[in-house]
Image (spheres, rainbow, N blue to C red):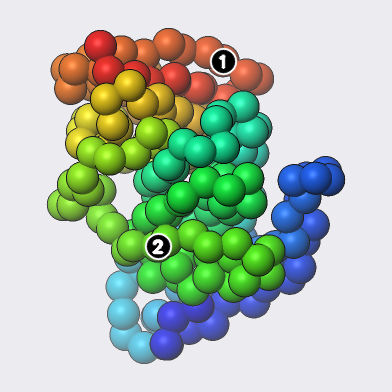
Amino acid sequence: MSDSFRYRTRPLLWGEPPWQLDLEVLVDFESESARLYAHRARAGLPADPDLSPMFGVIWPSAEAAARWVREQPTDATVLELGCGLGLPSLLAARRGARVRATDLHPGAGPLLAINARRNGVHVEYEQVDMRTTEPDPVWDRVIATDVLFAWDMPAIVARAFAHTLAPGGRGLLVDPGRAWSDAFPAAATAEGLATDIDVDGELFLVRIWRA
């Protein structure tokens, strides 16, 4: 999806009516990863983990967040941090919400634009690195899935929630039980947030609001 590398995609129908989505997703995460890193090696470029094509896959964490979106008021504004494919964002937009999706990966925005067009919805998009950027706190609902991928991310993500969640708003973090997921609730508390923790199979769900 970038100027120098094109990922292969395929169509996929996700969900059930009335909230079914017509999506383009990566053909295969492993094969696209191999193609990307071979391409970069031929160009004399480092592998760069920030460019891993995880953005183009529907992960179980995103599906859990999408189910949560269906329970939220349709007039709530929605921000998705580290959106990847943007499944929760697309579903929120389908339900009529004002939505902004953010991600660091250069391929996320173009693929999200394709899927927004396919489904006739509008999703604002901004390329954001949570490690350096702090958006304004104006969002009723804030979502993050599969973002605790390094030891420093619990504090970074907690700060992002604290800096984006509007007074009275609600947030949701979903993680597939990575080594750093247990550190997130304490990091959220340090940012003045309250949390409620649930476990759904292998998924670690944290509901978030201002303390």
Quadrant where the image shows the C terminus: top left
The residue that appears at 53% across and 62% down in the rendered structure is 122
The residue that appears at 33% across and 62% down in the rendered structure is 126
The label on residue 125 is 2
Furthest-right residue in this view: 17
Three-letter amino acid code of the residue under disc 2: Tyr
Q: Position of residue 188 (x, y in %)?
A: 26, 21
- Callout 1: 10 Å neighbours few (<14), some, many (20+)? few
* Cα gap from disc 1 to disc 2, whole angstroms: 30 Å
Three-letter amino acid code of the residue under disc 1: Val
Does residue 86 appear left or right of residue 22 in this picture? left
- Callout 2: 10 Å neighbours few (<14), some, many (20+)? many
The residue that appears at 55% across and 31% down in the rendered structure is 73
- Can you tell which quarter of the image residue 52 is in? bottom left
The label on residue 172 is none
Q: Position of residue 145 (x, y in %)?
A: 47, 39
Q: Is 190 above or below relative to 173?
A: above
Q: Which residue is mark 1?
A: 199
Camera-nearest residue between 36 and 81: 81
Does residue 201 appear left or right of residue 22 in this picture? left
Q: Nearer the viewer, mark 1 or mark 2?
A: 2
Does residue 8 appear left or right of residue 44 in this picture? right
Q: Position of residue 178 (x, y in %)?
A: 45, 30
